[in-house]
Amino acid sequence: MSWQENLDRWIKTNTFHHSRFSDIKRLVDLKEKKGLKISLGFPTLNEEETIEKEVKVMKDELQTNYPLIDEIAIIDSGSTDNTVKVAREAGAKVYLSSECLPRHGYLKGKGENLWNSLYLLEGDIILWIDADIKNIHPKFAYGILGPLLEFDEIVYVKAFYERPIKMGTNKLRRTGGGRVTEILVRPLLSNFYPELSGFFQPLSGEYAGRREILEKIPFRVGYGVETGLLIDIYEQCGLFSLAQVDLDRRIHRNRSLDDLGRMSFAILHTFFTRLQEQETISINRKIEDYFNLVRARGEEIFLVREKFSLIERKPMIEIGEYREKRRLLKEFKVT
């Protein structure tokens, strides 16, 4: 079977709409029948405007009304606003990424928070949701968790949605978000990982996976984390272990062009690294970790060089503290 036929079949069988999983009681029954525990982690950095509502919505509907999620936490990168305070008051556990695994040092970035959350959280399934969502709804959790609870062969699920973009101060244009995906990531996937080109939003910040897979995967510290996870899980488990779920619409903070440039640089670095490791391409020079930005001050044009921390954390299963903690948790469950 060609990759095109494989991809066509995958799109038909492994793409879902969140409404398919809206019977939350059924999902709770599946979770309990399979003896699973589910953790929800929010990676945060200065998200006081949205995190309180996100935590409350998930806690009220998916812990109090229906015991679908066993644990809700934020993993914070050093917020200077009230993120930590409001999240704790809303009922989330609060962890500071800088204090998680001190022997291994601390690096600032979303990927670092996700990596640390594997150590901190106890779930058999880990769900991550970005902390800047303005139209939060329980479907952002149950929609993504549904395929993992219904299908044992699925190990990793990503969300997709319509992404409006802010125009001016108060207007939203229906489409236009996801610019890095369309001008960078989709062309790269089409060329080098064509079976993954069926993902509507490979960079979406809402996804969930099974611990036994996530703990064996390295985590890029910064913006490249979503790309790295998708490629690595695909390489280890195959296309039909992955799924995507339509959540209809997501409204969040749109990034500046400067931020999108930095994001693109980190993602491109991730692609080059993976392609070199797999001997798909050969580059006879070091992959640059400085990003050159051209700036203007009046009539003066000058260059700003930003050094990126393009570091990759090793799979969590290789961390001694993690193996010891998981062993103790298993012994506690047995007793």
Image (cartoon, rainbow, N blue to C red):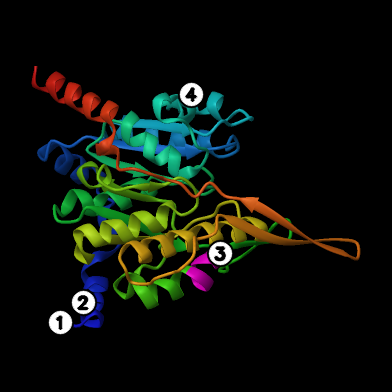
Nearer the observer, disc 2 or disc 4? 2
| Kind of residue at badge 1 | Met
Mark 4 vs 1, N-terminal side: 1
Residue extent of the magenta highlight:
178-184
Q: Which residue is mark 2?
A: 6
Q: CA distance from mark 4 to mark 1?
A: 51 Å
State yes or no: discs 1 and 2 in contact (Cβ < 8 Å).
Answer: yes
Residue at point 22%, 38% (across, down): 124
Q: CA distance from mark 2 to mark 4?
A: 45 Å
Nearer the observer, disc 2 or disc 3? 2
**Mark linked to residue 1:** 1
Q: Which residue is mark 3?
A: 177
For the residue pair 126 and 113, the one nearer the viewer reads as 113
Q: CA distance from mark 2 to mark 3?
A: 28 Å
Residue at point 27%, 48% (across, down): 209
| Kind of residue at badge 4 | Arg
Q: CA distance from mark 3 to mark 1?
A: 34 Å
Q: Position of residue 304 (x, y in %)?
A: 73, 55
Q: Is residue 119 above or below residue 209?
A: above
Can the viewer see residue 68 in this picture?
Answer: no
Q: Position of residue 77 (x, y in %)?
A: 52, 34
Can the viewer see residue 41 in this picture?
Answer: yes
| Kind of residue at badge 3 | Gly
Mark 1 vs 2, N-terminal side: 1
Q: Residues within 10 Å of mark 4 (few under 14, many from 20)?
A: some
* Count of residue discs: 4
For the residue pair 283 and 179, the one nearer the viewer reads as 283
**Mark linked to residue 169:** none
Circle 2 sits in a helix, a strand or a loop, which is it? Answer: helix
Q: Could you tell me what secondary structure mostly forms the magenta stretch?
A: helix
